[in-house]
Image (cartoon, helix red, strand yellow):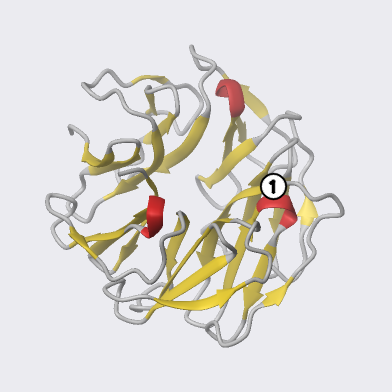
Amino acid sequence: MLLLDAALAGTDIVAVGERGAIIRSADSGRTWEAALSPVTATLTGVAFAPDTPLGWAVGHDALILATGDAGRAWQTQWQGKNLDASFLDVCALDAQRVIAVGAYGLCLATVDGGKTWTPRKILDDDMHLNRITRGPTGTLYIAGEHGTLLRSRDAGATWNRIDSPYDGSFYGILPLGPRTLLAHGLRGRVFRSTDDGDHWQPVALDSPMLIATALKTKTGALLLAGQARALYRSRDDGVTFTPWAIDFSSGVAELLEAPDGAILAFGESGATRLPN
């Protein structure tokens, strides 16, 4: 099945994807079991509040799902009246504060664990908001289309534009440290900043592939993956990248490091444990 996102729930892994699929693994991705999903719409993002079994999944049909048992069972917590609206990602700051973003500037937030969800207008233009991430100091970042890069230093209450080095779509900002960032997007565009996004330096790749996801491992290695069935890695904190020559040729939507240190790829081939 097509899987589009994954997250850790304690030592378990939960992944979501097409037709409402939610799967769980308790052994670092060696085996999987289906979780109880109440929907058939495609799910695009999943996140868990740190150190809790509370999680949220978002997707098409303006859906937000919630779980209280680390992803074993899910309930529809919110659904918009406009079923053409699509959420693309979700970030759980803690057990009470969660932010979901999506197509055409869609943004909802809760400060009470999902009892109420409030729409937030964070852009004047209705650009797709593709991914929301959180840095080690709590700063939030959003990457979107038409060069959209946003930053919030107050837990999402207000957002400021980051001067963009590229006017095409971005699919993520990966915080590498308190002020070091890696932004990635269409046509192999990768940029690195050491001053929290105030200035950017281009990072060269040898292929114009769409970079859908980036991961920093516990050992400090950086990995990039996307739609062109190619993987890249860096051992100098993102200054340079080289192809990762392994026997894997499938489009990737998300990379995740399992509790045992294995790298998992989620995408066209479902969930795959990559070679060490």
- Frontmost residue, 108 versus 97: 108
- Frontmost residue, 241 versus 53: 53
Instruction: Identify which residue is drawn at 38% across, 35% down.
Output: 252
- Frontmost residue, 248 versus 50: 248
Specify the quadrant that holds the N terminus. Answer: top left
Instruction: Identify which residue is drawn at 59% across, 64% down.
Output: 62
View extreme (right): residue: 124
The residue indicated by pointer 1 is: 128
Q: Quadrant of residue 24?
A: bottom left
Q: Quadrant of residue 54?
A: bottom left
Instruction: Identify which residue is drawn at 52% across, 70% down.
Output: 64
How far from the left and from the top, in percent, is residue 44? Answer: 48, 53
Residue 134 in view (yes/no)? no
Specify the quadrant that holds the C terminus. Answer: top left
Residue 73 vs 5, above or below: the answer is below
Q: How many marks?
A: 1
Answer with left or right where residue 54 lies relative to residue 141: left
Residue 218 in view (yes/no)? yes
